[in-house]
Amino acid sequence: MSAKWYTCESRGNNVKVLVCDSYETLSKKAAGILAGIVNVKPDAVLGLATGSSPVGTYKELIKLYEAGLLDFSKVRTYNLDEYYPLAPENDQSYHYFMNVNLFDHVNIDKESVHVPDGNAADMNEACASYEAMLNEIGGVDIQVLGIGGNGHIGFNEPCDEFVGPTHVVSLTESTIQANSRFFEKIEDVPTKAISMGIGSIMKAKKILLVANGAGKAEAIAKTLEGPIVPQVPASILQLHPDVTIIVDEAAAAGLKEYHA
Ligand code: GLP
């Protein structure tokens, strides 16, 4: 298990980057950061993400819980996004994903779990009430993020301007294609979602992004070393004061500063 820290300064920012020798190392390191926050602050508010990238991190958190090293009883969580329309009980929903991959295995109070309502009759109202909740807590203590191959975070797809609050998103063809691997057929992938906006994400006190595999290399390079543009939504993270990005060697392949 080896990992190397460096601080990415190529665009004048100070993002902490940890390049790991394997997905397992990456997952252990990310879980260690989250566990540290919960141990220091038992009622921490965690912003959580779905997708395959953080699954290993959640597995490691479960292990820490099972070993008696982590207590979720006072933790509150807010998830980034949810497909629309999709009921929380649907096994393709992100709510279901979180239950299966984390919540069902730890002692979290399900009343403390929040996922945007993919079943709401009025999606704009669902977005507004989710954003109001985020404002009320004044930003999560740490926001976990994955990243799409096109640089999206949450479901903030590349577009012509950054969208601030929680909003309804039309998914791009490339994201529908990428996410179809979890569905029986591509026609089953919802074309819309409710997602925290860039502003909602940037309110987090700390950001932890995990990415692995060659398919993320270009997005990671653009995020860290490219211009801050809405066409690469994750590039906005360069403006956040406390960002940690944990990647494996494959996802770090395009980072010039790391390989210099
Ligand atoms: C989805 C999610 C994102 C996630 C992305 C990458 O689109 N909405 O939050 O980061 O997929 O997923 P994966 O980690 O499976 O590559």
Image: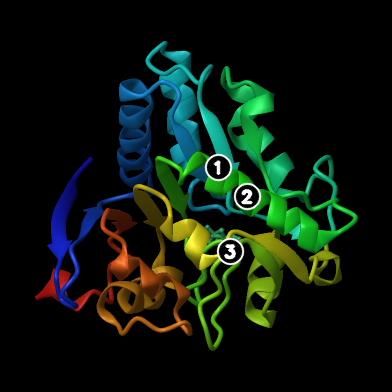
Q: Secondary structure at mark 3?
A: loop
Q: Which mark is residue 165?
A: 3
Q: Which mark is residue 136?
A: 1
Residue position marked by numbered label 2 in the rendering: 132
Residue contact between numbered discs 2 and 1, judged by CB atoms under 8 Å: yes
Q: Amino acid at mark 3?
A: Pro
Q: Which mark is residue 179?
A: none
Q: Quadrant of the N terminus?
A: top left
Q: Is residue 206 above or below residue 167?
A: above
Residue in the picture at 69% in, 71% down: 169
Residue in the picture at 64% in, 39% down: 98
Residue in the picture at 56% in, 84% down: 159
Ligand 1 lies in quarter: bottom right
| Mark 2 or 3, closer to the camera | 2
Marks 2/1: CA–CA distance? 6 Å
Judged from this view, the residue extending furthest toward the right is 121
Q: Earlier in the sequence, mark 1 or mark 3?
A: 1
